[in-house]
Image (spheres, rainbow, N blue to C red):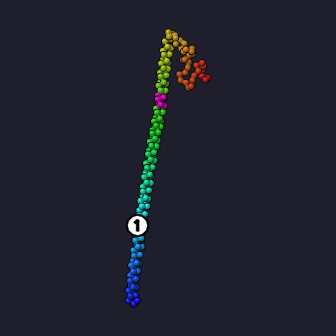
């Protein structure tokens, strides 16, 4: 081998090694870019899956919120209705009490007017004298006791048997 051939073979080998090195670098770059592409794809599918899961959870929460709000509204309406019913019941009780008071007043007024009419008729009978013997003569009712002896206004009940002031 001559030094020129040696140099030429050496240069050819260097060229071959450079080409091989260039190809290996290209393969590494392609593998790296393939790995990056796979990572990006994995990340995008993972993020899409995460977004889908997130959206499902948000939809589920929205559904639960709508359900709870509906229950709350129904409960509030029920509470409002119960409050209105309670107010109506109180108003009804107040009106019943007022009606009872009015009835009592009416009865008291009727009794007073009857008593006044009875007192007026007794006074008229007493003025007539012996001519109206049935009631004016004795001034007694069906029991035979004297009504004129009872005081006009009293507190509590009066016993008809004893009319003295010791009671």
Q: Which residues are magenta?
A: 96-102
Percent across and percent down for residue 156 are: 56, 25
Residue at the (47%, 31%) spot, across then down: 96
> SS for tag 1?
helix
* Residue designated by label 1: 37
Q: Give the class, few, some or many, for how many residues have Cα within 10 Å of label 1's Cα (few <14, many ≥20).
A: few
Q: Residue furthest bottom?
A: 2
Q: Residue furthest top?
A: 131
Whether residue 76 is visible = no
Residue at the (55%, 24%) spot, across then down: 154
Give whichever of 149, 9 is nearer the camera: 9
- Residue 125 located left or right of residue 29: right
Give whichever of 76, 8 is nearer the camera: 8
Residue at the (40%, 67%) spot, across then down: 37
Q: Is 59 rendered above or below residue 46?
A: above
* Magenta residue check for 76: no
Percent across and percent down for residue 58 are: 43, 54
* Magenta residue check for 97: yes
Tell me the quarter of the image containing the C terminus: top right
Percent across and percent down for residue 56 are: 43, 54
Tell me the quarter of the image containing the N terminus: bottom left
């Amino acid at each position: 081998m001559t030094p020129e051939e040696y140099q030429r073979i050496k240069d050819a080998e260097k060229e071959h090694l450079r080409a091989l090195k260039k190809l290996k670098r290209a393969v590494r770059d392609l593998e790296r870019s393939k790995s990056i592409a796979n990572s990006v794809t994995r990340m995008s599918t993972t993020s899409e899956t995460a977004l889908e899961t997130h959206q499902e959870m948000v939809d589920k929460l929205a559904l639960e919120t709508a359900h709870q709000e509906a229950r709350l509204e129904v409960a509030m309406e029920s509470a409002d209705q119960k409050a209105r019913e309670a107010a109506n019941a109180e108003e009804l009780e107040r009106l019943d009490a007022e009606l009872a008071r009015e009835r009592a007043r009416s009865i008291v007024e009727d009794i007073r007017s009857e008593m006044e009419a009875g007192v007026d008729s007794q006074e008229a009978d007493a003025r007539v004298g012996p001519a109206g013997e049935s009631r004016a003569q004795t001034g007694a009712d069906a029991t035979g006791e004297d009504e004129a002896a009872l005081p006009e206004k009293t507190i509590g009940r009066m016993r008809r048997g004893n009319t003295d002031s010791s009671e």
